[in-house]
Image: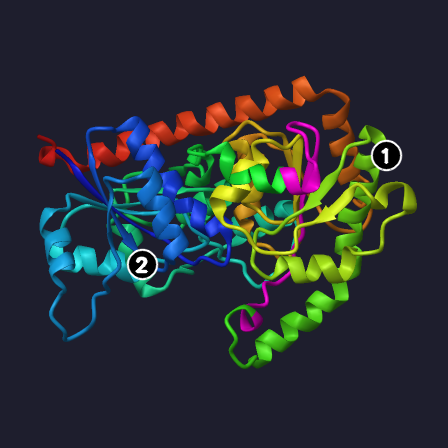
Amino acid sequence: MVHVVLVSGWQTVNIGDVAHTPGALRAFERYAPEVKLTLWARSIDESVRRMLARYFPDVEIIEDRVVPDEQLSPGLERMFAEGDLLVHGSGPSLVGQAEVAEWRRLTGKPHGFFGVTVDPLRPYFSTLDRAASMVNAIDGDLLTEREREVLDTAAFVYCRDSLTERFLAGQGLGAPKIAFGPDATVMFDVVDDGDGQAVLADYGLKPGRFLCVVPRLRFTPYHQIRNYPPAAEDLRRSAYNAGYLKSDLDVLRQTVIGWVRATGEPALVVPEMSYAMEVAEAEFAGTFPADVADLVHILPRFWDLTEAAAVYRRAGAVVSMECHSPLIALAEGIPSVYLRQPTDTIKGQMYNDLGLPFVELGPGTDAAAGQLMQKIADDRPAAAEVARQARDGAQERVREMVETAIAAVGSRIS
């Protein structure tokens, strides 16, 4: 039996970051059911542990770290001895590169990457088309020493967006496989409708007849989320957020107004990140016209992934400034529209790659989101079919990723 170790679980203040982990576990469970799975978790909390125990009871979770000059914990010793392959889960960067480097140093066994973004351009702010031009113009090594080490020696590198694939393909890496491979979130389809029932009941929402709306600031205010004194860069980003807050959220506001007036159906404003509801309450409460206001609801709290996914799967559509709520909806075949802010990374290219609708926020694009939502409302069966086809195509690509991963183990397969 092949033993796959997944390093994942980057943070819990973002349900998208949580979804990477069960998505990857689900991929191996579905497409390689004979493998043994261990999760080497970077940062999870009790609610995530409960979710994983509920849906993946056979997966062992290791949370110990490799500490320089200290003996390995018994769990790590066993994992390093018994594991055949380390898979770095989907993420915004090589978040687990330290764990990958330790795996390589201590075991010499194969490793690979399962849908990552490596953005060489940040902090340049641009559209994806402009970003593509900049990626094409890169001439030279833009990887750190450790990044190069873990990528160069990887058995496979699956990039969740084609701009990352293009960048890494030009970096002279020795990895035999560098290719597009979707974010594992597209596999998160282990959902219990009961987890979302309370939300539907509280707001009188009928399945298939409401819109979920996900706001975002241009930069995540991590100093507020994690309660540390802001550095100069945090202050700069807060000022930048303030400069675009009202114009960005007005795009969402107008989209909601258009949806409610066109369909007579409610909209529910919900978070992908823990800070979002404070923003939504401050910027949306009391700002909708009288004919719409009673049908716009703001969830006043953060929620966990299982509750969010259960609500998304019952929605008529999802419109989101965050990148992963549309993917969580996609796993359930629910139509969605992603509104990309120019400060976000090149990960947004994944929507082009998956054939999904998105809007680049900027001058002259204010009406585009509403037009896409109107298209969904006008022909819901067609919109649902587009979503299902995109999901099926993405999941088929994930199947190929799993097969490549298992093949990398080679003679370890028994």
- Residue receiving disc 1: 261
| Frontmost residue, 53 versus 387 | 53
Q: Residue at x 46, y 35 (%)?
A: 186
| Residue 125 visible within the image | no
- Residue receiving disc 2: 97
Where is residue 206 shown, x and y percent of the image? 67, 30
Type of amino acid under label 1: Arg
Q: Quadrant of the N terminus?
A: top left
Disc nearer the start of the sequence (1/2)? 2
Badge 1 marks a residue whose secondary structure is helix
- Is 371 in the magenta? no
Residue 102 appears in which quarter of the rendering? Answer: bottom left
Type of amino acid under label 2: Gln
Vertical placement of 355 versus 250: above or below?
Answer: above
Q: What span is in magenta?
A: 201-224
Residue 234 appears in which quarter of the rendering? Answer: bottom right
Q: Is residue 295 left or right of residue 17?
A: right
- Is 216 in the magenta? yes
Vertical placement of 142 versus 175: above or below?
Answer: below
> Are circles 1 and 2 on residues that touch, CB within 8 Å?
no
Q: Residue at x 79, y 60 (%)?
A: 246
